[in-house]
Image (tube, rainbow, N blue to C red):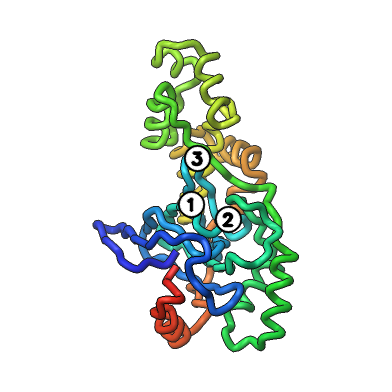
Amino acid sequence: MTGISTARRADAETRTLPVYQAGAAVMPFTITGMDELVARDTVWAPHSHPTHELLWNRAGASTATIGPRTWTITPSVGLWIPAGVLHSAAAPAGTWYRTAQVDSRSSSPLPAEPVAVEMTPLLTLLLERLVDHTLQARSRELTEQMVFDTLEPSAHALLVQRPTAELLRPIVTALESRPGDDRSLTEWAARLGVSERTVTRAFRAETGLSFGAWQAAFRAQHASVLLGSGVPVDEVAVRVGYRSASAFGAAFRRTTGLTPGQFRPATGSAPRPLRSPAEDAAETASLSDPRYPAS
């Protein structure tokens, strides 16, 4: 998610990246990694990579959007984005994200579409080992093969599909503005002048979920980013429409299969980059070659 050009607004930053077709660049290795500790709220405008991208966080929670679908990215659940797929992303200040750019010619066990990935401790260690550019060729080849053997879809994907039907637009707009909006299905149906069944059918047709299930997933996704930013659980519960932290925690676990505490940011000393500034500078120089566009 590194940017080529940036446009700064107040305390937020918008980064603009190029759009590449799959396989449009030759990479130095089959798997090339990098990381960044985001200093301010950051948005990546729609872009695509010439490589497959595996995106996850070492600390905090962020989101990636592809069409109407938005995934939450955490230290335990990453996202596989196939080469050439247009996507955008957002991360609050304090997020420490990691990416692995995977050569599009490689054989991956994952489907040829975006999918959440279980970031096990073993997979994370293998990927971090590949950041070492001094790794011997045979060791790198074996490590890369182990990565491919370890990749698997996650059962804990937090995915929200944004409805686009005109009928549902007022509901979506209201919840995006205030996730704690507590209007019920009955109230929304009355507001829209239709039956509850009509609203339910519209939600199921676009998202596969009932209004209540979609609202719970939407709130959980918003909550995960707040939790990853260090907002206290009690405050997160209020912001996303729950009367107590216990009620929020129960709903969050039902939706995500995880506890709110598992989305908290890392504590202790400030995280260190996986490589030294000199190593990052060296890679920046190598990526200035047209064969290795920044990604």
Q: Mark 1 sits on what residue?
A: 64
In the rendered view, tell whether residue 130 sits above or below residue 8: below
Q: Label 3 to label 2, Cα distance in Å? A: 26 Å
- Residue beneath the point at 58% across and 45% down: 158
Looking at the rendered image, the quarter that the C terminus falls into is bottom left
- Foreground tag (3 vs 1): 1
**CB atoms at circles 3 and 1 under 8 Å apart?**
no
User: Could you tell whether 278 is left or right of 78 in the image?
Assistant: left
Q: Mark 3 sits on what residue?
A: 237
**CB atoms at circles 2 and 1 under 8 Å apart?**
yes
- Residue beneath the point at 45% across and 23% down: 183
In the rendered view, tell whether residue 220 sits above or below residue 182: below
Q: Label 3 to label 1, Cα distance in Å? A: 23 Å
| Numbered label attached to residue 34 | none
In the rendered view, tell whether residue 172 sits above or below residue 80: above
Q: How many marks?
A: 3
**CB atoms at circles 3 and 2 under 8 Å apart?**
no
Q: Nearer the viewer, residue 225 or 233?
A: 225
- Residue beneath the point at 48% across and 73% down: 270
Residue type at mark 1: give it.
Answer: Ala
Residue 15 picture location, percent across and down: 34, 61
Residue type at mark 2: give it.
Answer: Leu
How busy is the neighbourhood of tag 1: few (under 14 within 10 Å), some, or many (20 plus)?
many
First in sequence: mark 3 vs mark 1:
1
User: Could you tell whether 193 is left or right of 261 in the image?
Assistant: left
Residue type at mark 3: give it.
Answer: Ala
First in sequence: mark 3 vs mark 2:
2
| Numbered label attached to residue 79 | 2
How busy is the neighbourhood of tag 2: few (under 14 within 10 Å), some, or many (20 plus)?
many
In the rendered view, tell whether residue 70 sits above or below residue 197: below
Residue 63 picture location, percent across and down: 48, 51
